[in-house]
Image (spheres, rainbow, N blue to C red):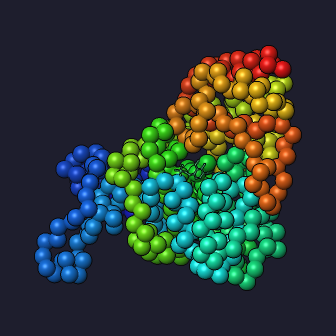
């Protein structure tokens, strides 16, 4: 087998990159996968090497062959200049923000953002002198009206991971770049397979590897990829904070990455089928799935995205808490739990109304977020149908 060069990678398709990126069997005595390197201390071969830090690896927090494998692979997948890997998706959000903000800056954040991101902006960033303004996710090029001379960054998330509003990322990026601001995007839902973030104008792209990279709900990980203009600041921030993940988690993420395209396609197929089925149910007022024709955000999705994943929401007609409990408590296949992207189906109730500041969340019913796993669709439909029947009986 001959070595894969950067020129090879440039012409490879996504699936080939997923399979081959970030590993070199020749460096691992012929074994296919890069093994788990555990370690803090790295022994240098000479006084010259330790004094001038001339070794490829210098200390555990600065990277190992295991973390290098994942970072290199993700960089190739995203067509980025570089990637850092951290211990959770939320840590990826926070390190990306810290890499491009300083005291006195102004930050624009979509009102549909993952709530812990919001808490970080309203808590720690505020404490360090960064002011955040939330904006309507549908703002598009009108983001210009919200920009101030000190606006340093615009944070996007598309779609919003509960409410599923889409964002016009190219339009926002055009304005932000013209005004000298950095564009960040939480791209966890689409992954680089369905939305190539840097080609679409994003400077810093965030992925909670906890979701589809893992695919098994068994690890926590976050990745931030950067384009050339933002790579140095991101890497410097990472080196200053040393929030490195555990090597087992990185290894599992690499393992998950190899089959991610197949899993995502199946999550996509199952979710679209279930969303269509739910649209026909009398209990359902609205289905929020941008990949579904006629659903909110579908036009932007169709223009900019190459696929959709397994997470979407529905709004059911108003119910009491007891009626909702009757439906959800006895589901057999849909577990009630946070996170998503694993092989198993999940469902959670949600209500964005209590924390939105730029928009009003009033969908006229109860929100339920559904993660569609890899079970048989007929079984999933039957589980929900029985839940709806329990709900009707509780009325
Ligand atoms: C959109 C989005 N971003 C980031 C995260 C954070 O990921 P983690 O759970 O790994 O911190 C989540 C978690 O649910 C999420 O939904």
Looking at the rendered structure, the number of numbered marks drawn on it comes to 0
- Left or right of residue 278, residue 21 in this image: left
Task: Tell me residue 225's x, y (percent).
Answer: 51, 63
Q: Residue at x 65, y 33 (%)?
A: 347
Which residue is more in the foreground, 371 or 264?
A: 371
**Location of residue 333 with respect to 131 vertically, above or below:** above
- Left or right of residue 192, residue 259 in this image: left
Which residue is more in the foreground, 14 or 377?
A: 377
**Location of residue 330 with respect to 53 vertically, above or below:** above
Task: Tell me residue 389's x, y (percent).
Answer: 76, 17
**Location of residue 388 with respect to 146 vertically, above or below:** above
Task: Tell me residue 119's x, y (percent).
Answer: 64, 60
Q: Residue at x 64, y 22 (%)?
A: 331
Q: Quadrant of residue 7?
A: bottom left
- Left or right of residue 160, residue 17 in this image: left
Q: Residue at x 82, y 26 (%)?
A: 283
Q: Is residue 22 visible?
A: no
**Location of residue 376 with respect to 182 vertically, above or below:** above
- Left or right of residue 77, residue 108 in this image: right
Quadrant showing the C terminus: top right
Task: Tell me residue 351's x, y (percent).
Answer: 75, 44
Q: Quadrant of residue 44?
A: bottom left
In this view, the residue farthest toward the bottom is 149
Q: Is residue 122 visible?
A: yes
Q: Residue at x 35, y 60 (%)?
A: 68
């Amino acid at each position: 087998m001959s070595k894969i060069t950067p020129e090879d990678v440039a012409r490879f398709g996504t699936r080939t990159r997923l399979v081959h990126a970030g590993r070199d069997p020749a460096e691992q005595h012929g074994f296919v996968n890069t093994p788990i390197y555990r370690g803090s201390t790295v022994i240098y071969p000479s006084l010259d090497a330790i004094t001038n830090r001339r070794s490829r690896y210098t200390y555990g927090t600065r990277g190992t062959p295991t973390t290098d494998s994942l970072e290199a692979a993700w960089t190739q997948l995203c067509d980025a200049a570089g990637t850092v890997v951290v211990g959770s998706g939320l840590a990826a959000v926070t390190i990306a923000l810290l890499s491009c903000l300083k005291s006195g800056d102004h930050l624009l954040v979509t009102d549909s953002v993952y709530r812990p991101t919001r808490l970080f902006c309203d808590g720690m960033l505020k404490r360090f002198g960064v002011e955040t303004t939330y904006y309507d996710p549908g703002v598009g090029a009108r983001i210009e009206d919200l920009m101030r001379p000190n606006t340093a960054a615009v944070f996007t998330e598309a779609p919003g991971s509960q409410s599923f509003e889409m964002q016009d990322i190219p339009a926002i990026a055009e304005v932000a770049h013209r005004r000298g601001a950095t564009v960040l995007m939480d791209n966890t839902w689409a992954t680089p397979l369905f939305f190539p973030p840097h080609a679409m104008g994003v400077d810093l792209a965030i992925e909670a590897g906890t979701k589809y990279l893992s695919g098994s709900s068994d690890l926590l990980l976050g990745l931030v990829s950067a384009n050339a203009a933002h790579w140095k600041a991101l890497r410097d921030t990472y080196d200053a904070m040393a929030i490195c993940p555990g090597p087992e988690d990185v290894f599992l993420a690499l393992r998950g990455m190899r089959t991610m395209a197949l899993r995502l396609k199946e999550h996509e197929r199952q979710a679209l089928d279930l969303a269509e089925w739910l649209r026909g149910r009398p209990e359902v007022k609205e289905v929020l799935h941008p990949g579904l024709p006629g659903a909110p955000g579908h036009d932007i999705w169709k223009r900019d995205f190459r696929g959709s994943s397994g997470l979407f929401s529905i709004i059911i007609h108003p119910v009491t808490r007891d009626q909702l409990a009757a439906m959800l408590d006895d589901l057999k296949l849909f577990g009630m739990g946070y996170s998503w992207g694993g092989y198993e189906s999940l469902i959670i109730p949600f209500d964005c109304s209590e924390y939105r500041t730029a928009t009003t969340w009033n969908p006229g019913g109860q929100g339920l977020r559904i993660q569609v796993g890899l079970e048989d669709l007929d079984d999933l439909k039957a589980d929900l149908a029985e839940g709806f029947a329990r709900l009707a009986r509780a009325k």
